[in-house]
């Protein structure tokens, strides 16, 4: 397949190395980190208003974290050798440390916190359900069925401690993703000390937005009233985080424009041609300025509840588009120009291919399927667990 | 000796691994080669290159480089007057079959052979997640093909565009400085066939190597020196327009 090239590329540069799957990877890990940080607001900073989203945020983070390494695995030339990263990691490689940060975050933070938070429910369910469900819940108790007040108090303290450890871990998880790109000195589009910070804040933006959207969607599905106090607070946090994120991105942009180093002409041309749609239109206008404007309206004007709901839903969806476009522009954009700064190549994405669009769509849908299963087994709604507990109590 | 079924089951996998080694045979020996006595690099005299592409062809034959991928290639630069920031560059087929006559009038034309710079502080080895790519004790950047994951991080990290993923092995591939040849006292395939001696293999640890005299008496440069990669490809006659 002939790849269209404009100007001069080094001959080995014509073919893009990192595909849409590598776009998906920071997108998914960003949602994990953002959702966890939102959850920690309630647990550590005692923001009571966001409590209805606490468990949902944790389950969302887990569902996305379970799928996050899949695009990487599918992208590798030799996925069967990926375990070598654990056995013989190269300590100077940012990518090598991913495995450890990922495992730490998955096992030591997220799974443990969810288990501690749900332990009482799990024990109650293991007693109130029957058949295979009972077996699953029994296994999930890990042999501990003590739900005395003292035990629950210890759970609460341990959970708090894990969340406190979890916040820097979430920062690390996504900050290092930014570092993977930001530390490549060969590529001026990526090489920036701001990259980890920009990635972190964009992760928080996307994570908060997805939990807000999921909460509103699930309330609609369950035909329940949306807790507007909660959604208003989440939207407020989304608005503030978005402003910081946008400011950082603009700082990076202004710095590049003002400094105008040897790569500037090439990058400037790219933004005005090949990346115009995804960068200027999708990322900046539609995916950043529009949702910030919409959220600003809700902060400034006293809008009725119905209108606020619609605005939040629209702003949330636009945010997701904008953050995905940002990942796209970083990963794909960073490979469209030559390191000689004398030419440009083209990214041709297949549809039914190992690294094609269909695979990317499936990998995007998969976390939602996992989330649905998790919600089924570990309902994040307080009334469900309360009902189950009272049922169990009456059975006793 | 009597062997139980359990013992046999335990021994079978070990025997399979041992058999694999027997089949693989012994590596080609270079008994007199001591890695610690060498530090390899290359000298490229741009003023001598005629853009014939012999080096590219020789490299592809010697190292079984797949079509459309390059361990070495030749670029042609055209620079008009003072606008050296915007040169016109082409490298049709990596310069494998030479170049058609230049169309541009005026200014200067010259050829620049490119290959892995075998950097002492190579960004590509730094980022490899498993250390499959490494700098050998004699200063050659190599890739362990049986260990590489094919994650492509090294391809991204190379500032010179010298790496690619071999579509057959799905692993990172690049110039090895014909390691299989230089460890036997031969020169690289590209140096061997160059009709104008543009390329010269250099052993920087050997005080008798003519490179030392050349470096002392000529102005030489490396590519992209601001990146501080410790490149060991020294260019004589390198124009400021070259990237």
Image (cartoon, rainbow, N blue to C red):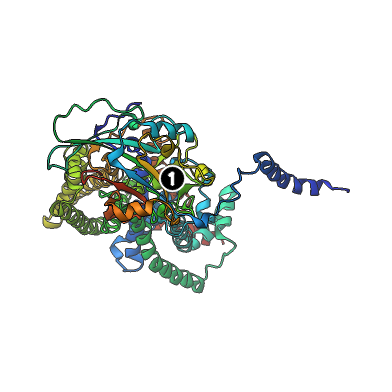
Left or right of B8: which side holds A66? left
Which part of the image, by quadrant, shows the C terminus of chain A? bottom right
Q: Position of residue B213 (x, y in %)?
A: 35, 54
Is residue A286 visible in the rendered structure shown here? no
Q: Is residue B230 above or below residue A80?
A: below
Q: Position of residue A232 (x, y in %)?
A: 22, 57
Q: Nearer the viewer, residue A10 or A167?
A: A10
Give the farthest residue toward the bottom.
A150
Q: Quadrant of residue A382?
A: bottom left
Tell me which residue sits at (31%, 32%) in the image. Answer: B51
Left or right of B189: which side holds A211? left
Q: Position of residue A277 (x, y in %)?
A: 20, 37
Which part of the image, by quadrant, shows the N terminus of chain A? top left
Secondary element at tag 1: loop
Q: Residues within 10 Å of mark 1 (few under 14, many from 20)?
A: many
Q: Nearer the viewer, residue A332 or B139?
A: B139
Q: How many marks?
A: 1
Subunit ID for the residue under disc 1: B
Tell me which residue sits at (34%, 32%) in the image. Answer: B94
Left or right of A197: which side holds B209? right
């Amino acid at each position: 397949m002939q790849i269209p090239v404009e100007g001069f590329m080094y001959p080995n540069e014509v073919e893009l190395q990192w595909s849409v799957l590598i776009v998906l990877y920071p997108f998914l890990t960003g949602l994990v980190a953002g959702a966890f940080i939102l959850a920690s607001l309630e647990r550590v900073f005692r923001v009571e208003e966001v409590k209805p989203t606490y468990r949902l945020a944790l389950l969302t983070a887990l569902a996305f974290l379970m799928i996050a390494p899949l695009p990487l695995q599918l992208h590798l030339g030799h996925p069967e050798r990926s375990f070598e990263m654990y056995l013989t990691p190269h300590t100077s490689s940012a990518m090598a440390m991913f495995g450890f940060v990922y495992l730490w975050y998955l096992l030591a933070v997220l799974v443990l916190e969810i288990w501690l938070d749900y332990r009482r429910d799990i024990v109650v369910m293991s007693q109130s359900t029957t058949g295979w469900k009972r077996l699953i819940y029994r296994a999930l108790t890990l042999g501990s069925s003590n739900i005395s007040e003292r035990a629950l108090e210890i759970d609460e303290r341990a959970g708090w401690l894990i969340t406190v450890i979890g916040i820097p871990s979430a920062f690390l998880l996504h900050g290092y993703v930014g570092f993977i790109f930001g530390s490549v000195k060969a590529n001026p589009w990526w090489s920036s000390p701001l990259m980890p910070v920009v990635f972190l804040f964009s992760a928080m933006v996307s994570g908060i937005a997805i939990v807000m959207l999921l909460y509103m969607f699930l309330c609609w599905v369950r035909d329940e009233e949306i807790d507007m106090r909660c959604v208003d607070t989440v939207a407020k946090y989304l608005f503030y985080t978005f402003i910081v994120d946008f400011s950082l991105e603009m700082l990076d942009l202004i710095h590049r424009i003002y400094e105008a180093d040897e790569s500037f002409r090439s990058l400037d041309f790219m933004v005005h041609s090949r990346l115009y749609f995804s960068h200027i239109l999708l990322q900046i206008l539609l995916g950043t300025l529009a949702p910030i404007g919409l959220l600003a309206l809700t902060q400034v004007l006293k809008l009725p509840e119905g209108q606020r709901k619609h605005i939040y839903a629209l702003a949330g969806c636009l945010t997701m588009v904008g953050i995905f476009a940002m990942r796209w522009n970083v990963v794909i954009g960073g490979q469209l120009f030559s390191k000689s700064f004398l030419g440009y190549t083209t990214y041709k994405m297949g549809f039914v291919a190992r690294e094609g669009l269909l695979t990317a769509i499936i990998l995007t849908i998969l976390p939602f399927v996992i989330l649905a299963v998790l919600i089924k087994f570990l309902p994040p709604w307080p009334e469900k667990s309360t009902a189950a507990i009272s049922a169990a109590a009456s059975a006793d | 000796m009597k062997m139980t079924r359990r013992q046999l089951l335990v021994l079978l996998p070990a025997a399979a691994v041992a058999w694999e080694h027997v089949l693989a045979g012994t590596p080609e020996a270079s008994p007199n080669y001591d890695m610690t006595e060498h530090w390899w690099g290359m000298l490229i005299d741009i003023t001598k290159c005629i853009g014939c592409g012999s080096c590219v062809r020789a490299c592809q034959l010697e190292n079984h480089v797949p079509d459309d991928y390059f361990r070495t290639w030749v670029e042609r630069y055209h620079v008009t007057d003072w606008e050296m920031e915007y040169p016109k560059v082409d490298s049709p087929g990596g310069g494998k079959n030479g170049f058609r006559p230049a169309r541009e009038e005026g200014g200067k034309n010259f050829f620049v052979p490119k290959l892995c710079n075998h950097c002492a502080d190579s960004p590509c080895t730094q980022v490899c997640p498993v250390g499959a790519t490494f700098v050998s004790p004699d200063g050659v950047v190599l890739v362990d093909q049986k260990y590489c994951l094919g994650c492509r991080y090294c391809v991204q990290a190379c500032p010179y565009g010298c790496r690619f993923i071999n579509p057959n092995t799905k692993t990172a591939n690049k110039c090895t400085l014909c390691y299989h040849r230089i460890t036997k006292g031969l020169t690289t395939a590209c140096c061997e066939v160059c009709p104008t001696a543009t390329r010269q293999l250099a052993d920087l640890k050997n005080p008798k190597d003519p490179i030392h005299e050349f470096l002392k008496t000529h102005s030489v440069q490396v590519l992209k020196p601001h990146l501080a990669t410790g490149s060991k490809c020294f260019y004589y006659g390198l124009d400021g327009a070259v990237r």
